[in-house]
Amino acid sequence: MKASDKAYAALRQDIVSWALPPGTVLGEVEQAERLGVSRTPLREALSRLAADGLAVAQRGRGVVVSDVSLDHVDDLFSLRRALEVEAARSAARTGDPEEFEDLARDFDAAAEALDAPAERDAYYALAGRLDAAIEHAAANAYLTQALHGLRVHLARLRRLSHDAPDRLRESAREHAQIARAIATGDPGLAAAATMLHLHHSLDHIRSHALPKEATA
């Protein structure tokens, strides 16, 4: 892996996980030493993060981790609805029913085991498997690229709300419904299940958002 790719991947993960929270100054010397790369590939990584919207240049401070707040939620979910509903429709037309039935069963099991942090991590990994299966079935490279860019920001936004076990269980059941709808081969049903999940997700973020000072 190129040094710039290594630095980009590490910084991107730290930003998405909030190990580097919004407003953190990404000093070239400090970050280059921390990541074990020289300043040239570090600058390339910072440029890529800025292109992703994860970092911004601020006068007098240098490059900092970009802000994320509830002010962005409606715009993000408008785009999410357009992309994920279309992806689910396409996946229902061409997806492997057995694969999606298996995923539905995994979500059923996950819904019963979502109290410990480690179990939540496993749930998010399972959600990532469903995303990947839908993208593969949809077979639209442009749609996949747009979804990947969007999900980075959605992962950061999720940290503004509590990871309540009750909501995660509901979300697991909703994902099971999406997977089963795709398995039936019914695009309309897959779209409706996806819309329902997104509606509940948006309501949860709005009603359980952490205070702004907690994100600083």
Image: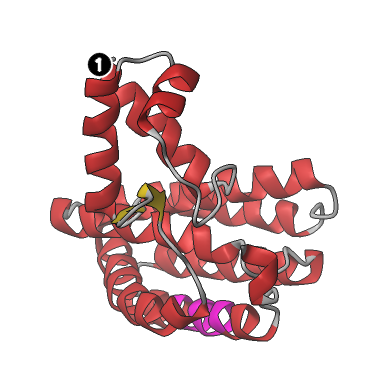
> Against 165, is 118 above or below?
above
The verdict on residue 199 being magenta is: yes
Seen from the viewer's position, the closer of residues 38 and 100 is 38
Task: Please identify the quadrant where the N terminus is shown.
Answer: top left
Q: Residue at x 72, y 52 (%)?
A: 110
Above or below 185: residue 209: below
Q: Amino acid at mark 1?
A: Lys
Q: Is residue 54 above or below residue 40?
A: below
Residue that appears at 81% across and 52% down: 113
Across and down, in percent, residue 189 comes to 41, 80
The image quadrant that residue 26 belongs to is top left
Residue located beneath label 1 in the image? 2
Residue for point 76% across, 41% down: 118
Q: Work out whether residue 196 can be spotted.
A: yes
Residue 182, horizontal then vertical, whole percent: 41, 65
The crowd level at tag 1 (other Cα within 10 Å; few <14, some 14-19, many 20+) is few
